[in-house]
Image (spheres, rainbow, N blue to C red):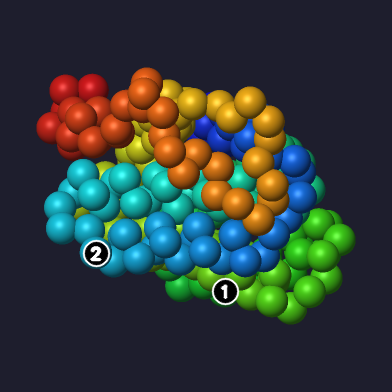
């Protein structure tokens, strides 16, 4: 759990450097759908791990922009990671978790709640299923660490980006793709 807590903190810090803490439904929906699409199109294990990590990173940023604090984000992951082998149990908890997050965020909007539920389902059912299928479920926090490492090589804009614009459309000259490290994780070299 300690590793996932550290990666959640890193994802929050990454977002804090680039955005004001303002939730934009359209951007959140667009980013989440883009990453879920990449997962569906993944042709190999590296692409699956990359998409799983990106979906998780986007979700953490989404929660932060909804004013969910680090403690509640970590609690959410801790809760689901303890029941990771039981998709039926996870599915039963998703709506309640989405409602809870929506309420503590102050949004109280049905569309936001449904997006949160979709994100929860994407991570804790679809991603977990994909990771289980390729024998990498126990490496979930390692995948997120590699994605955080890669994202931290993206350049930081001089000014924070508007809440409705994707940060790092251009990744900058120092960007390092996560694929090489993900491949090392798969082959046991890491």
Q: Is residue 124 left or right of residue 112?
A: left
Nearer to me, 41 or 171: 171
Residue 92, numbered circle: 1
- Which is more N-terminal, label 2 or label 1? 2
Residue 167 placement, left or right of 98: left
Location of the C terminus by quadrant is top left
In the image, is 97 to the left or to the right of 174? right
- Of residues 183 and 139, the one nearer the viewer is 183
Which tag is nearer the camera, tag 1 or tag 2?
2
Image coords of residue 36 (percent x, y): 39, 63
The residue sitting at 30% across, 33% down in the picture is: 178
Looking at the image, which is closer to me, 12 or 74?
12
Q: Which residue is mark 2?
A: 41
- Residue at 64 percent of width and 75 percent of height: 114
Local crowd at mark 2 within 10 Å, few (<14), some, or many (≥20)?
few
Residue 113 on image: x %, y %:
69, 71
């Amino acid at each position: 759990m300690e590793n996932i807590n550290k990666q959640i903190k890193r994802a929050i810090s990454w977002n804090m450097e680039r955005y004001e803490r303002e939730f934009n439904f359209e951007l959140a929906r667009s980013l989440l759908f883009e990453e879920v699409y990449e997962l569906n199109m993944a042709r190999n294990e590296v692409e699956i791990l990359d998409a799983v990590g990106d979906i998780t990173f986007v979700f953490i940023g989404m929660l932060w922009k909804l004013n969910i604090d680090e403690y509640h984000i970590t609690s959410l992951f801790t809760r689901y990671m303890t029941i990771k082998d039981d998709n039926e149990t996870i599915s039963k908890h998703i709506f309640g978790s989405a409602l809870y997050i929506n309420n503590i965020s102050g949004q109280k909007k049905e569309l936001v709640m449904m997006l949160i539920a979709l994100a929860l389902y994407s991570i804790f059912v679809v991603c977990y299923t994909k990771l289980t299928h390729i024998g990498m479920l126990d490496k979930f926090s390692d995948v997120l660490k590699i994605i955080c490492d890669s994202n931290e090589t993206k350049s930081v804009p001089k000014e924070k980006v508007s809440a409705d614009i994707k940060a790092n459309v251009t990744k900058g000259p120092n960007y390092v793709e996560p694929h090489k490290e993900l491949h090392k994780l798969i082959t046991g070299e890491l």
